[in-house]
Amino acid sequence: MTEVRPTDQEFLEFAVKALVDNPGDVKVERKIDEMGVLITLDVNPADMGMVIGREGQTAKALRTILRVIGA
């Protein structure tokens, strides 16, 4: 049986949409180059504080989870 695993891009989009007030404005772009994977997140400016979190803790937690998914 083949297991379908969500990608890092799908996970990030799902998690951020659950955090913000304007989930329709969330856009995630993934690029691969010689330095590795770059994931760009675009959200409504009003939701920026929710994604960053207090002292950057939410953004740091999302980065940590993405590192684990990518390993």
Image: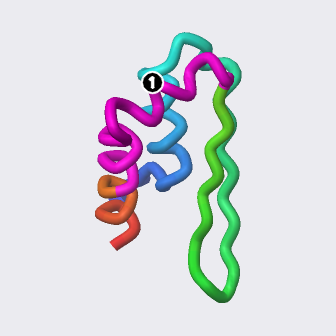
59 over 40 or under it: above or below: above
Label count reads 1
Q: Is residue 56 left or right of residue 36?
A: left
Residue at (56, 21) in percent of width and height: 47
Name the kind of residue labelled 1 in the image: Met
**Residue lying farthest bottom?**
34
Q: Mark 1 points at which residue?
A: 50
Residue at (47, 32) in percent of width and height: 51
Q: Nearer the viewer, residue 14 or 67?
A: 67
In the image, residue 46 lies in the stretch drawn in magenta: yes
Residue at (45, 24) in percent of width and height: 50
Image spot of residue 8 (x, y percent):
48, 54
33 over 46 or under it: above or below: below
Q: Give the position of the N terminus as an image quadrant.
A: bottom left
Residue at (49, 26) in percent of width and height: 49
Q: Quadrant of residue 64?
A: bottom left
Q: Which of 50 and 64 is in front in this view?
A: 50
Predominant secondary structure, magenta span: helix
Q: Quadrant of residue 28?
A: top right
Q: What's the magenta region?
A: 44-63
31 over 36 or under it: above or below: above
